[in-house]
Amino acid sequence: MRNFIEINHNLRLNSLNRGRLTAVARKFLALLRMIVKKSDKLCDFVEK
């Protein structure tokens, strides 16, 4: 029974870590999009 509880706890930890990872990934993607938008504006500015 103790093993089952430990496994359950580990699974919960893993899902927490995964949630944290996806949050970080989303922030990173948002940052990338911002950078791309800014570089697009820069390119437009340079071309003019």
Image (cartoon, rainbow, N blue to C red):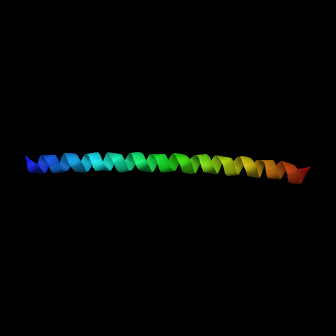
Q: How many marks?
A: 0
Query: Based on the displayed image, in which of its 4 quarters is residue 46 positioned?
Result: bottom right
Q: Position of residue 41 (x, y in %)?
A: 80, 48
Outermost residue on the bottom side: it is 46
Outermost residue on the left side: it is 1
Q: Residue at x 60, y 46 (%)?
A: 30
Left/right placement of residue 26 relative to residue 42 reads left
Left/right placement of residue 1 relative to residue 25 reads left
Q: Residue at x 24, y 51 (%)?
A: 10
Q: Residue at x 42, y 49 (%)?
A: 20
Q: Position of residue 17 (x, y in %)?
A: 36, 50
Q: Position of residue 45 (x, y in %)?
A: 86, 50
Left/right placement of residue 19 relative to residue 3 reads right
Q: Position of residue 9 (x, y in %)?
A: 22, 48
